[in-house]
Image: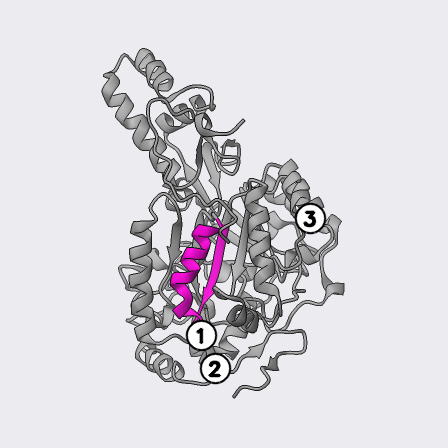
Amino acid sequence: MSDLLEQPKAETKPLSGAGKSYGIPMSVLAEITHRCPLQCPYCSNPVELDRANAELTTDEWKRVISEMADMGVLQIHFSGGEPTARRDLAELIRHATEVGLYSNLITSAVLLTRDRLAELSDAGLSHVQISFQGSEAQLADRVGGYRGGHGKKLEAARWTRELGLPLTINAVMHRQNLHQLPEIIEMAVALDAERLEVANVQYYGWALKNRAALMPTEEQVDWTTQIVEEARERLHGILAIDYVIPDYYALQPKKCMGGWGQQFFNISPSGKVLPCHAAESITGLQFDSIRDHSLAWIWENSPALNLYRGTDWMPEPCRSCALKEEDFGGCRCQAFALTGNASATDPACSFSPFHEKIFRAAKTEAEGSDQFIYRNFKGGTPEANRS
Amino acid sequence: MSAVPARTLRLELTDASRPRLARHARLKFDKVRELWVLLVPERVLVPDETAIEILNLCDGERSIEDVVDLLSEKYAADRELIRTDVIALLQDLADKGYLINAAEEKS
């Protein structure tokens, strides 16, 4: 059985303009709010957060969820911010279930109660992903900037399994918590999770602000790879572990989102349709809103989505590269963050002229200060009592 | 954490197992793409024709033996070959957590 991702050929349709094609969107990340009680310094949300009064209404979300199903979207990921901060979450999940979508909840879990989770389960929720900031409360609560958070997550993970829902543990890893990886793996097994995502921080937005406090050392990365390989073998059939090495230490760029605007999109709290959750970090791009157009229109016509579809936009060294359709030149947001030019080759690629420079920068930053800048609506607050 | 009974044992399928898809593994026909898909956490799988037929027979009532019997009869093929294929497919899904053995479920 193969992943649908690996079989896009039969279902891509040509766009006007040679060399451009895109698929039927398969899954959507619905960031229903940017509000969140946690203040993680690597948050994937943009630095400029959408305020509560800009958020789409329940009816607007229901309309676009119906449109997703009509377009062929199969899975919806309810995310944020913290999605459970919205009181209408169960109603949105129920609507997604009614139109035939498979729904995932991506949550910090600190606002959940057992009753609330049962309500979401009854609405048809299929899967719960809970983020963890470490293996024990002291470090985890410091990273999340939320006292008591770790304990609440453990409790919510147990309720998830008691209610018969499958559980994924998402562990966001960086220099200051990588040493806890063996304990995190054991925690995932003890919580009866099916999957563990060992998610190395991706450096856009908030994480870019905090890069010096988060960047792992090369030794940590090598050690992590060994730990993951050993655990995968030992826990075969018990716990699946997803792991991608951090971009800055890679030689080849990741096939980001399976290609810009190919099979995924993201809807921001205020209704903008983005090719990924970080795309607003590329300044100068105008993303269309579901308040102005139908989803199907945006998927087909949005200039920002069409900009980096296919391979025609590529400069050298991508243009003449044999791997250009394998990785689509890597990540546009990372290219912008590190070179100031979103159409440059992703510097994670060893063919990029910037590759050496970013690798050196990573090594230098890995020796930097541990002080965080916490994520909030005020543009960030430096951690107290640490420098 | 020790209060939670963790799934520390791999589900190993035998002829007597009565597998069915877990609640979070949903087999459905996608009308837009005109193909069968298996929806699982964070992924969409495309089963081939044989897999679709096998999965549709795995209802938690039939044992693997029953499924193999039905398929051998229908295709008049070597029973042992069919059994190997059926178990290989289902064990792979069980290892990923998408399959439940109804014979082991507490009622």
Amino acid type, callout 2:
Asp
The residue positioned 53% from the left and 32% from the top of the image is B31
The vertical placement of A69 against A249, above or below, is above
Lateral position of residue A114 relative to residue A337, left or right: right
Amino acid type, callout 1:
Gln
Q: Residues within 10 Å of mark 1 (few under 14, many from 20)?
A: some
Which dot marks residue A176?
1
- Separation (CA) of disc 2 from disc 3: 36 Å
Toward which corner of the image does residue A324 lie, by quadrant?
A: bottom left
Secondary structure of the residue carrying numbered label 3:
helix
Q: Which residues are magenta?
A: A168-191
The residue positioned 28% from the left and 64% from the top of the image is A320
Task: Give the total number of marks visible in the rendering.
Answer: 3
Q: Residues within 10 Å of mark 3 (few under 14, many from 20)?
A: some
Circles 1 and 2 in contact, beta carbons < 8 Å:
yes
Query: Which chain's residue wears label 1?
Result: A
- Separation (CA) of disc 3 from disc 1: 33 Å
**Residue to which mark 3 is pinned:** A116
Q: Are marks 2 and 3 on the same chain?
A: yes
Toward which corner of the image does residue B17 lie, by quadrant?
A: top left
- Look at the image and tell me in which quarter the N terminus of chain A lies: top left
Q: Are marks 3 and 1 on the same chain?
A: yes
Lateral position of residue A245 relative to residue A322, left or right: right
